[in-house]
Image (cartoon, grey):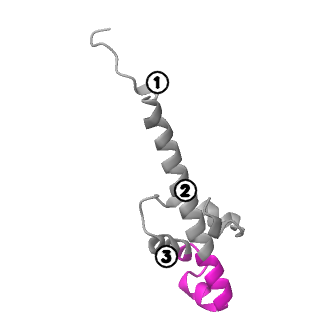
Amino acid sequence: MNDYHEHLTIHPIVRQIIDRDCHIGISNRAVIRHVISKLRSGMNTFRQMSKADRRDLMRQCIARHRENQELYVDVMRGWSSLGMTHPKFRRTERGK
């Protein structure tokens, strides 16, 4: 995990929303917008939060999204460096 975000505690709801709904390829801005849209009253809830709380929510979103991106890279690098594919998808001889 990135040293900059190591001190952050990510709220379980934020973690769940990002893990469930956000692809690793989308931008940080899109992730933040999506999490805000999932709040009870959406943008109205976000606007009612203090600036510090808003900033903290955005940092949590970015940190979790970055963790997911790093995990993806680690997993894919592991498979490709071993030259392996998943056994379920291994090619077999035709007709057998």
Q: Nearer the viewer, residue 37 or 87?
A: 87
Q: Position of residue 46 (x, y in %)?
A: 59, 85
Task: Give the Cα separation between the discs numbered 2 and 3.
Answer: 17 Å
The answer to whether residue 85 is visible is no
Q: Position of residue 2 (x, y in %)?
A: 60, 63
User: Which residue is farthest left?
Assistant: 94
Q: Is residue 75 magenta?
A: no
Element at badge 3? helix
Q: Which residue is mark 3?
A: 33
Looking at the picture, which amino acid does disc 3 mark? Answer: Arg
Q: Where does the magenta region start and end? A: 36-58
Q: Which residue is mark 2?
A: 68
Q: Residue at x 60, y 75 (%)?
A: 59
Q: Is residue 53 magenta?
A: yes
Q: Which residue is mark 1?
A: 87
Q: Is residue 36 above or below residue 85?
A: below
Q: Residue at x 63, y 62 (%)?
A: 15
Label 3: how many residues lie within 10 Å, few (<14), some (14-19) or many (20+)?
Answer: some
Task: Give the Cα separation between the discs numbered 1 and 3.
Answer: 38 Å
Q: Is residue 68 above or below residue 59?
A: above
The image quadrant where one finds the N terminus is bottom right
Marks 1 and 2, the one that precedes in the sequence: 2
Q: Quadrant of residue 51?
A: bottom right
Label 2: how many residues lie within 10 Å, few (<14), some (14-19) or many (20+)?
Answer: some
